[in-house]
Image: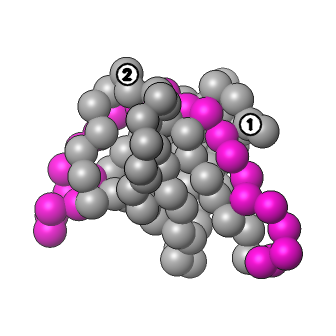
Amino acid sequence: MMTTETGERREAFRISLSLDRRLSFSELGCEGHSGGELEDLSQNGVKFTADRRVDPGTSLIIRMKPDDVEREPVVARAVVVRCEELPGGRFEVACRLTGVE
């Protein structure tokens, strides 16, 4: 476990992304999807903002498109560990990754 400059304890290195990184997500076993914006990504988890609340414990399929349009999207399975409302009605969703395809 490492400690960041701000004193946070992390199990894996995180990459903070300031660029607009669109992603889509859907609840496991449900049709339809929602959009979000990737905030950070590590080998163990992902954090993104979304227009709707996603309850902790919800299993998701997350699709992240690379900048290179010819490459296939990265598809990950994840479980929501935290969802907090942000100013403006958006939500910050933190997930633990359970698999990557």
Q: Which residue is mark 2?
A: 57
Q: Residue 30: which quarter of the image?
A: top left
The percent position of residue 32, horizontal first and vertical second, equals 41, 50
Instruction: Name the residue at 54% across, 61% down.
Output: 23
The percent position of residue 90, horizontal first and vertical second, equals 23, 60
**Is residue 23 found inside the magenta-colored segment of the image?**
no
Q: Around disc 1, counting alpha carbons within 10 Å, would you say few (fewer than 14), some (14 to 19), or many (20 or more)?
A: few
Q: Around disc 2, counting alpha carbons within 10 Å, would you say few (fewer than 14), some (14 to 19), or many (20 or more)?
A: few
The segment highlighted magenta reads 68-91
Mark 1: which amino acid?
Val
Q: Say if 16 sits above or below 28 in the image.
A: below
Q: Is residue 49 left or right of residue 11?
A: left
Instruction: Name the residue at 66% across, 40% down.
Output: 76
Q: Quadrant of the N terminus?
A: top right
Instruction: Name the residue at 84% across, 68% down.
Output: 71
The percent position of residue 95, horizontal first and vertical second, equals 48, 36
- Residue 30 versus residue 73: which sits nearer the camera? 30
Instruction: Name the residue at 55% across, 39% down.
Output: 61
Q: Which residue is mark 1?
A: 100
Q: Is residue 70 left or right of residue 92?
A: right
Mark 2: which amino acid?
Gly
